Image (cartoon, rainbow, N blue to C red):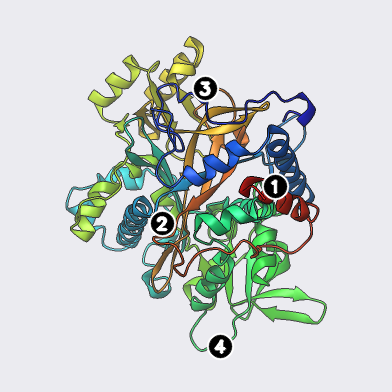
Amino acid sequence: MTEPSQAASHLNFKDYDTVGFFDELIDEHGNPRPGTQLLTQRLDELPDEEILQRQQMAERSLFNMGITFNVYGDDQGVEKIFPFDLVPRIIAAAEWEILENGLKQRIRALNHFIDDVYHDQEIVKENIIPKFVIESASSFRPQCVGLDPPGGIWCHITGTDLVRNIDGTIHVLEDNLRCPSGVSYVLQNRHVMKRSFPWLFDASHVRPVVDYPSRLINLLENLAPAGIESPTIAVLTPGIYNSAYYEHSFLAQQMGVELVEGRDLVIRDGYVCKRTTKGFQRVDVLYRRIDDDFIDPKAFRKDSMLGVPGLMDAYKNGRVALANAPGTGIADDKVVYTYVEKMIRFYLNEEPIIPNVPTYLCFEEDDRKYVLENLDKLVVKAANEAGGYGMLVGPHSTVEEQKKFAELIIKNPRNYIAQPTLSLSRLPTNIDGKFEGRHVDLRPYILYSDDIYVLPGGLTRVALKKGSLVVNSSQGGGSKDTWVIAPAPNQQGVEPANSDVVSGNELGQANSQDQITQNQVQGQ
């Protein structure tokens, strides 16, 4: 970021150009969108130096809190600080209500699908999904056939990626039901933003996210085996080299539960126990952040050193609860994704509220022919890759890259889908002391227990590289705070400016500066 002394007067929206894209903050006429007027006005009134100072304080705060992610195979080092931009995404109450209902609808249908796949497979019998799509999915777990998770719920924690196209339509880009990550950044981004602009929160009626850890622990407590009034809960992590280890430790700390690795646990008399200095202690619920393949070397990969031998037997016998349930990854498969709209109609007898992105299935001959002839125009994705890997963005690819993907598709067509290259919506972002548009997506988080709760907002990820459509942190992306506006002023459910996710005085010096700036804005 640019130092204050170097910055020209460019951090305002008067000369901001949407360049023909749908912008989440500024419309095509250069006017703030409904609900964003207060933010744009306040930022326009602040001097550039003040905005840059706040940006630097926010970055320093995040650095001091150790908010990082790991990048595998990076020669510059494993641990990275997750970039953050101060300009938030704002979602009006009416639009959020539609998205919330659409996400609840989708997760209900996906849960029905997962349960069906591991039981009667009615959706296959009715020829809604080809049987070979299920059987050939690398994320289908035969070990889970016949499983009955508590309450019939498989996907307790979900992160669903949403994108907005140039026409303003929001689509579901993909579902993440195995070990969705990123919610810690949502909580810490909000913490930093409230410290940076406390008066703006008071005036903007932003819905809270601070209660996510308490909702998560309530969900986990409700999963406990019958008869246990005060269950012992732990977060199961692969360890410090996992890309989301910071989040694992953060959520464990916020919930007040143990963070454990597989080597800390053992099966004794059919129960999961953790080793302590006072002997073995039973564990009743595990929030697992380890993929199915690695949770139990007896049931899945025999070479796994990360899991707990015998864990699946304890789970099947109802002696421990797992969130998410093993086997949910079948719904993460990007080929299976193309059938979710049909799932909604089949299981719920409803029309989808949020549409999928139009998708070509490379195992279908006509689709494959079209994809191979238009690789320079399409986005091609491997069925089970994540983090921006295994993907070809046609318009930004080379002829050699296109040739490579053509060979991969021909060799294994079941493993690839293709989609049109969407003109993802953008948001103003501080780039070297100037607001420039950068492409964004949105990952809301859904908790499924007795009812379904959608965290208001979620993680807005931003592609910091000019022109890039890849927002993943491992590919150079950053994040922004996401503000969902409450339906009406003074209504309950508004986040107070002085509520914090974590304790500490990371931005303690900012409070006096906040008051000075607030007086300047209000003309005092």
Residue corresponding to mark 4: 229
Residue 445 lies left or right of residue 273; in this view the side is: left
Residue corresponding to mark 3: 467
Q: Check disc 1 and report its element: helix, strand or loop.
A: helix
Q: Earlier in the sequence, mark 4 or mark 1?
A: 4
The percent position of residue 75, horizontal first and vertical second, equals: 75, 29
Question: Which disc, if any, is residue 379?
Answer: none
Q: Earlier in the sequence, mark 3 or mark 2?
A: 2
Residue at horizontal 43%, vertical 56%?
328
The answer to whether marks 4 and 1 mark residues whose Cβ atoms lie closer than 8 Å is no
Q: Earlier in the sequence, mark 3 or mark 4?
A: 4
Q: Amino acid at mark 4?
A: Glu
Depth check, front residue: 519 or 105: 519
User: Could you tell me which quadrant the N terminus lies in?
Assistant: top right
Q: Amino acid at mark 1?
A: Thr
Query: Looking at this rendering, what residue extends furthest in the top direction?
Result: 399
Residue at horizontal 47%, vertical 57%?
456
Residue corresponding to mark 2: 142
Could you tell me how far apart the alpha carbons at marks 3 and 1 are, in whole angstroms?
34 Å
